């Protein structure tokens, strides 16, 4: 095998079990992955996984989408016994995240498996409970989050056993190739999956090809092909990662890059504040600095506040280890629900509202100022029109001009009736207004904008009625 550093290493693993129980099967793998989902949910809730892990048969069957029949409960019991019975002889395969090295030794996955609890009459209302003790190496890796990311929901979409078998290897293959296309010896893959090998391309496509297409359908593969090998006889499978697979690889890459050099890097003030908040919640200073260096400070503080709210609201005390729960929440990339408003968001909303209120007030003031200027502009035109009227019509001529305006207006009976009801002074003002408007329409005035530019400081004294 070639690792990511380009060095060849020898790896091997041998599985052994008793003749009575046999080796775990595909259905056992389904149950194991469902059990891992339960274990990681426990870690998210409690902050740490401790031996023994107790769970109800109903909860595991529910994850598997199976009914709680007596047959399925017996299958769970057989699975657990096989897992405890199976031994693995590892050579550079099993890694201990605590010891930071691979182990060349014989190990188990389950140290023990026990069936607990009782069931109702005729299996009605079953309450079967199970208890698993994990081996130290696996428990350490789970608590250190040193596990291969596998989406059980995606896995459940697969029906064919071969597709499920390939699924569990895809992450390792594409991780080693850094997300590039990989080639797999068809015969060697069949031996790995313990399935029959075929000699013709058409038969290969009819068998393993269907499983590969299933993986395309869930987004773990983008495409696949069968081609003859150049160096020896036989065929190879060409596998191209799909979008879902690339997303998993990208998530892993981000976590790894974030870890590089974080211990010695000085933290910014905002990250120091986030680290202090973590320490206040019981997180160790080393872990707090690691998280504060990897995660965006404001989002980190939001998550701390949300988890603190959860802990305070946990009246039944289900969260036994708040600090561990907080760490697990952060490392599993959980998000703050959209319906939970943090104090930072409240401050931002208040600042936004204050800004909008200030902007609205400025806009209103500007609109009033503009309206006032528009009124000044109209008043200026009226003054200028009055000046033109005084020049055009001396006193006697003005009287004659107003008579002419009156005669023209009286052509409309409604207007004539209106003028007759006015006093002599009121009638004169009304006729002057019509004359002024007539002059305003005749003259070529500067536009409002031109008037402002000509004299931006122009202000007219309040004028009385004409």
Image: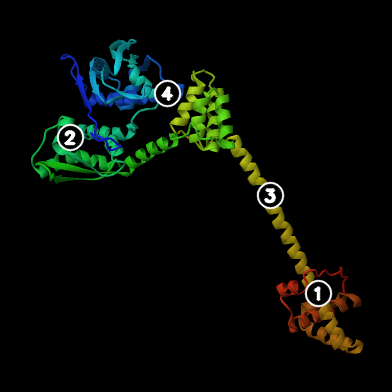
- How far separated are the C-alphas under marks 3 and 1? 34 Å
Which of pointers 4 and 3 indicates the residue nearer the eye? 4
**How many other residues sit within 10 Å of disc 1, few (<14), some (14-19) or many (≥20)?**
some
- How far separated are the C-alphas under marks 4 and 3? 46 Å
> Which quadrant of the figure contains the C terminus?
bottom right
Report the front residue among 378 and 312: 312
Which comes before the other along the chain, label 2 or label 1? Answer: 2
Q: Is residue 335 left or right of residue 119?
A: right
x, y percentage for residue 143? 40, 23
- How far separated are the C-alphas under marks 2 and 1? 94 Å
Q: Which of the 4 quarters of the picture holds residue 367?
A: bottom right
x, y percentage for residue 372? 77, 65
- Residue 275 visible? The answer is yes
Which comes before the other along the chain, label 3 or label 1? Answer: 3
Which of pointers 4 and 1 indicates the residue nearer the eye? 4
Tell me: residue 144, above or below residue 454.
Answer: above
Instruction: Determine whether label 3 and label 1 are within 8 Å by CB.
Output: no
Tell me: residue 192, above or below residue 89.
Answer: below
**How many other residues sit within 10 Å of disc 3, few (<14), some (14-19) or many (≥20)?**
few
Task: Give the residue pinned by disc 4.
Answer: 43
Q: Is residue 51 left or right of residue 416?
A: left
């Amino acid at each position: 095998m070639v690792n990511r550093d380009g060095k060849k290493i020898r790896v091997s693993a041998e599985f052994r079990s008793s003749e009575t129980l046999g080796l775990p099967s595909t259905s056992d793998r389904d149950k194991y992955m469902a059990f891992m989902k339960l274990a990681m949910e426990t870690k998210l809730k409690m902050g740490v996984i401790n031996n023994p892990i107790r769970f109800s048969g109903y909860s595991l069957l529910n994850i598997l989408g199976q009914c709680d029949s007596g047959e399925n409960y017996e299958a769970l019991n057989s699975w657990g016994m096989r897992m405890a019975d199976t031994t693995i002889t590892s050579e550079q395969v099993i890694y201990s995240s605590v010891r930071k090295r691979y182990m060349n030794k014989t190990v188990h996955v389950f140290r023990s498996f026990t069936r607990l609890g009782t069931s109702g009459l005729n299996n009605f209302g079953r309450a079967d409970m199970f208890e698993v003790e994990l081996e130290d190496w696996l428990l350490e890796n789970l608590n250190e989050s040193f596990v291969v990311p596998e989406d059980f929901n995606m896995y459940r979409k697969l029906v064919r056993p071969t597709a499920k078998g390939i699924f569990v290897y895809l992450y390792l293959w594409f991780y080693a190739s850094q997300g590039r296309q990989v080639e797999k010896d068809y015969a060697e893959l069949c031996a790995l999956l313990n399935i029959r090998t075929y000699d013709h391309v058409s038969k290969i496509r009819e068998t393993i090809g269907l499983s590969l297409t299933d993986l395309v359908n869930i987004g773990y593969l983008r495409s696949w092909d069968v081609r003859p090998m150049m160096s020896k006889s036989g065929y190879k499978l060409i596998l191209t990662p799909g979008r879902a697979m690339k997303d998993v690889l990208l998530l892993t890459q981000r976590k790894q890059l974030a870890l590089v050099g974080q211990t010695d890097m000085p933290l910014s003030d905002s990250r120091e504040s986030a680290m202090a908040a973590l320490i206040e919640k019981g997180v160790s200073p080393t872990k707090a600095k690691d998280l504060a260096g990897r995660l965006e400070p404001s989002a980190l503080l939001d998550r701390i506040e949300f988890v603190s709210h959860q802990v305070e609201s946990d009246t039944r005390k289900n969260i036994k280890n708040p600090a561990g729960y907080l760490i697990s929440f952060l490392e599993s990339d959980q998000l703050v629900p959209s319906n939970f408003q943090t104090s930072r968001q409240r401050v931002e909303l208040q600042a936004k509202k204050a800004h909008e209120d200030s902007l609205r007030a400025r806009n209103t003031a500007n609109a009033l100022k503009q309206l006032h200027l528009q009124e000044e502009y109209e008043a200026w035109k009226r003054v200028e029109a009055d000046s033109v009227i005084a020049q055009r019509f001396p006193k006697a001529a003005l009287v004659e001009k107003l008579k002419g305006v009156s005669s023209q207006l009286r052509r409309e009976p409604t207007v004539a009736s209106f003028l007759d009801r006015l006093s002599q002074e009121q009638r004169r003002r009304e006729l002057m207004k019509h004359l002024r408007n007539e002059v305003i329409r005749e003259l070529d005035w500067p536009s409002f904008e031109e008037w402002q530019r000509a004299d931006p400081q122009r202000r007219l004294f309040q004028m009385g009625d004409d």
